Amino acid sequence: MRLVLIIFSFINIALYYTAYAYFDNIISALAVYNLPVSLLNFLKFIIILILGFMIGFLIVISMKRGWRKNYFDIKTFLLAGCIPAVALLLYKTGFVNMIVSRLFNSNLTVSELAFYFFSRETIWTIWLGVAIGASVRLKFKSSPRKFKHQVID
């Protein structure tokens, strides 16, 4: 089962990476439908998030750990995913621009620093996806051991 999931993850990573690489061509093909820009931005965000999730999930299923049950490790997610989640929320809501304009009086150096640090949505989204994927814990069924001295009906 682990091997099937690893192969499935590699295939999904290749597909989502291809979708992200050709996203501009996909947008031009969808231009005839006059889709709103916010939907296209959300679609791009979801593609990148799933790509990051599959990378993180591949890391977890490649490890030879034996968990007792399937669960989502919230502690791992909070440790690894709080920085990108906060960065995405601050930048998308415009809170960073408000802080720069009010506290620093729109200082050019601080504005450029905040822009270049927070505007890398792709990096933050992939990091968040990897954190979500690395927080998934799966228990793989192990085959019951058959001992030579046991009688099996």
Image (cartoon, grey):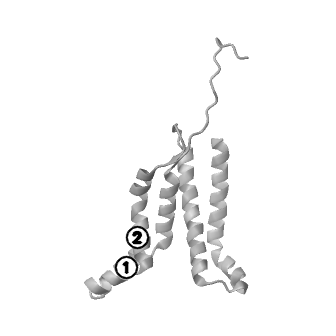
Residue labelled with disc 1:
95
Horizontal and vertical percent position of residue 77? 44, 55
Structural distance between the alpha carbons of marks 1 and 2: 10 Å
Residue labelled with disc 2:
87
- Residue 87 sits in which quadrant? bottom left
Residue 148 vertical position relative to residue 84 in the rendered view, above or below: above
Q: Residue furthest front?
A: 153
Which quadrant does the C terminus fall into?
A: top right
* Residue at 63%, 17% in the rendered image: 147
**Secondary-structure class at tag 2:** helix
Label 2 neighbourhood size at 10 Å, few (<14), some (14-19), many (20+)?
Answer: some
Horizontal and vertical percent position of residue 107? 29, 86
Taking depth in this image into account, of 111 and 49 the one nearest to the observer is 49
Q: Residue furthest top?
A: 149
Residue type at mark 1: give it.
Phe
Residue type at mark 2: give it.
Ala
Residue 61 vertical position relative to residue 41 in the rendered view, above or below: above
* Residue at 65%, 20% in the rendered image: 146
